[in-house]
Image: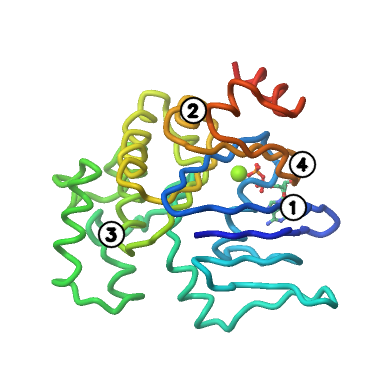
């Protein structure tokens, strides 16, 4: 579903990704863990073109989004292809990013109408089903300001799903939530995983990584240090930096 090869990214003089590679199959649920500033968000954002890479190659579902030629020039496909390819991925952010002036329902149907050109009545049944799925059917007329953080994040998940993505990217979806609200969001994500959604999840929730992810990767200082099945990763981490990080999370 995703093949990332030797991704390099710098912001000014800071090399934020130093050759990150990852292969993700259909139905994989991969947890990305690592210290703050290690490049986790940048990695996710490069995959769906919220950031450009400087070098490397990204294929999404067998289609090349960007590649680098022998001279080291990084080449993206055309804008229309970028949009089409990146639409296969939905993203959920730490800060929800809901449209504040729109109701819950409007938030969910906005992109299908404006991007996919669906008519309101075509997308409404899907939107209602998705809101029911995340446990918010009765909130369809509420505004984001009237919701708890956990409810907002579940709307954000429903909104991403309304575009019918094949892959979901989550960037610390519970980090902005009060502890008592993380459970409801993690349950929604667990349910998605059980339905075999392909998911790449940056998280500090070690129990989620252990119980829901089939693979865990550890990033540190712009490098992917460890990539292992979840059980192995926690039982027997190979790299000393992974061990130190896991110790610090206890
Ligand atoms: P993480 O998500 O693991 O905390 P990030 O990918 O957000 O890490 O950041 C990695 C590094 O890149 C940090 O040093 C951060 O300050 C820097 N960085 C991220 N985004 C930008 C940006 N838009 N401009 C400049 N530096 C950035
Ligand atoms: Mg981050």
Disc 3/disc 1 C-alpha distance (Å): 33 Å
Is disc 1's CB within 8 Å of ligand 1? Answer: no
Residue position for label 3: 108
Q: Secondary structure at mark 4?
A: loop
Q: Secondary structure at mark 1?
A: strand
| Marker disc for residue 17 | 1
Q: Looking at the figure, which quarter contains the C terminus?
A: top right
**Above or below for 188 versus 84:** above
| Marker disc for residue 221 | 4
Query: In x, y percent, where is residue 134?
Result: 25, 43
Q: Which of the two labelled residues, at mark 2 and mark 1, occupies the earlier sequence position?
A: 1
Q: Is residue 18 left or right of residue 219?
A: right
| Marker disc for residue 104 | none
Q: Which of the two labelled residues, at mark 3 and mark 4, occupies the earlier sequence position?
A: 3
Q: Which of the two labelled residues, at mark 1 and mark 4, occupies the earlier sequence position?
A: 1
Q: Is residue 189 left or right of residue 19?
A: left
Instruction: Identify which residue is drawn at 63% across, 59% down.
Output: 4
């Amino acid at each position: 579903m995703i093949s990332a090869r030797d991704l390099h990214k710098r912001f000014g003089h800071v090399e934020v990704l130093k050759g990150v590679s990852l292969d993700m199959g259909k139905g994989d649920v991969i947890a990305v863990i690592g210290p703050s500033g290690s490049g986790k968000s940048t990695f996710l954002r490069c995959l769906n073109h919220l950031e450009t890479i400087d070098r490397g190659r990204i294929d999404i579902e067998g289609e090349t989004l960007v590649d680098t030629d022998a001279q080291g020039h990084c080449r993206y496909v055309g804008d229309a292809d970028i949009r089409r390819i990146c639409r296969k991925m939905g993203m959920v952010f730490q800060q929800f990013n809901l449209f504040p002036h729109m109701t819950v329902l409007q938030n969910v149907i906005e992109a299908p109408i404006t991007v996919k050109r669906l008519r309101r009545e075509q997308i409404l049944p899907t939107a209602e089903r998705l809101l029911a799925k995340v446990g918010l059917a009765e909130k369809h007329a509420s505004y984001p300001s009237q919701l708890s953080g956990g409810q907002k994040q579940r709307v954000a998940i429903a909104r991403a799903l309304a575009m019918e993505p094949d892959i979901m990217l989550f960037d610390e979806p519970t980090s902005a939530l009060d502890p008592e609200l993380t459970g409801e969001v993690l349950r929604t994500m667990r349910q998605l995983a059980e339905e075999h959604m392909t998911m790449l999840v940056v998280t500090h929730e070690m129990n989620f990584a252990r119980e829901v992810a089939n693979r865990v990767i550890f990033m540190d200082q712009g490098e992917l240090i460890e990539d292992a099945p979840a059980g192995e990763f926690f039982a027997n981490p190979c790299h000393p930096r992974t061990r130190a990080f896991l110790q610090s999370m206890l």
